[in-house]
Amino acid sequence: MRKESLKFLEQLLDAPSPSGYEQPAQRVFREYVTPYCDDVTTDVMGNVFARVAGKGKNLPKVMVVGHTDEIGLQIKYIDDRGFLYFAAVGGVDAHLTPGKRVNIHTAAGPLPGVIGKKPIHLMDAKDRETVVKLEAQYIDIGAKDKKEAQKLVRVGDAVTFESSFTRLQGDRVASRGFDDKAGCFVVAEVLRLVKASGKKLNVDLYGVSSVQEEIGLRGGTTSCYTVNPDIGICVEVDFSTDQPDVEKKHNGEVGLGKGPILARGANINPPLFELLSATAEKEKIAIQHTASPRATGTDANVMQISRGGVATALVKIPLRYMHTPVETISLGDLEDAAKLIVATLGRISSKEEFIPR
């Protein structure tokens, strides 16, 4: 991967962005894409819109979107001893949290803490088989009492798991937040590659970094209404089934390093799917497929049914260990997803070609 792109990816992943608290990551996104766009704006929700004008007037509008928010925690209560109780922001696994290091994002900056856990020596047999509910778990910041804790932390402060960008073997990397900063990264790289080509597209391109996807596709809903696209491509992550404990019958046979995934189903516009597939074949980009018989739980869902309807596709990045601090992907899959989308944009000439016949 290009050195500057990898640095951007690491900075994006490092920036905290639980749903509703995305602006540290959005600032990284805005700074990176600004040189490649005609204008960059942010709405009241926090969605970022990066526009690249095409060649001509009354062109089809294409929106490429990835959400920048990640799962996390939020401080709910501080007890008399200075321990912090919390709630989940998005789909947090209660099995996973005890014993984890965390950062509480306070007005004065990040504050380290740990999620406590009763020692196994003090647990009876029944307790050892029981998952402690999130509402009963707590963060220890080392405060001596409530008064000291309240000087450092406010109710409502966001919390992220401590996690560093880790290089594994080959082009495999692990970090928290690849869901969906992987998609946000691909959107930014699409904008960069379009600019680098030196050619004007036959579409007006909007690269969107959306917010609050993890709590109900909220930013995707409002950003679609703002852009009012004719064509939309959502870039997301999907469960890789090449790890030992995942059933292929649930999500098909897909794996890391085998290319981006194209979804098929009711949420996907058939002509746009075929265009992506044909482009991948022509450009010799490996792709994989999954079936989505219902609406997908992604921004593609709300995009498709925005206003009078949008021709929508879903390009997904294979991901292991979703919603953990060690989400793992292949860098090559990210690069191929961006190349596929850019090549597809170059083959779009009118919005009418996506009306099913």
Image (tube, rainbow, N blue to C red):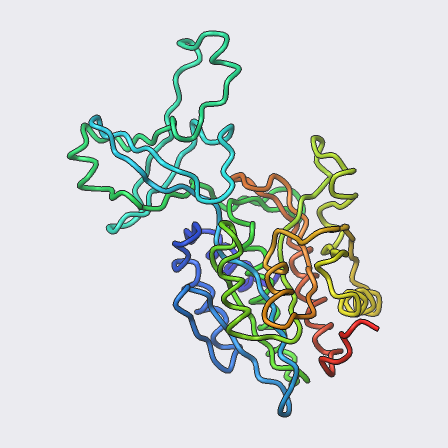
Q: Quadrant of the N terminus?
A: bottom right
Q: Quadrant of residue 311?
A: bottom right
Q: Quadrant of residue 309?
A: bottom right
Residue 177: x and y in percent read 51, 48
Task: Compare residues 286 and 309 and report the one nearer the observer.
Answer: 309
Q: Residue at x 76, y 50 (%)?
A: 290
Direction bottom: furthest residue = 56
Q: Is residue 262 above or below residue 73?
A: below
Q: Residue at x 44, y 44 (%)?
A: 89
Task: Compare residues 328 and 81 and report the one nearer the observer.
Answer: 81
Q: Quadrant of the C terminus?
A: bottom right
Left or right for 160, reference 268: left
Residue 251: x and y in percent read 74, 43
Direction front: furthest residue = 308
Q: Residue at x 62, y 55 (%)?
A: 236
Q: Is residue 291 above or below residue 357?
A: above
Residue 126: x and y in percent read 50, 10
Residue 316: x and y in percent read 67, 55
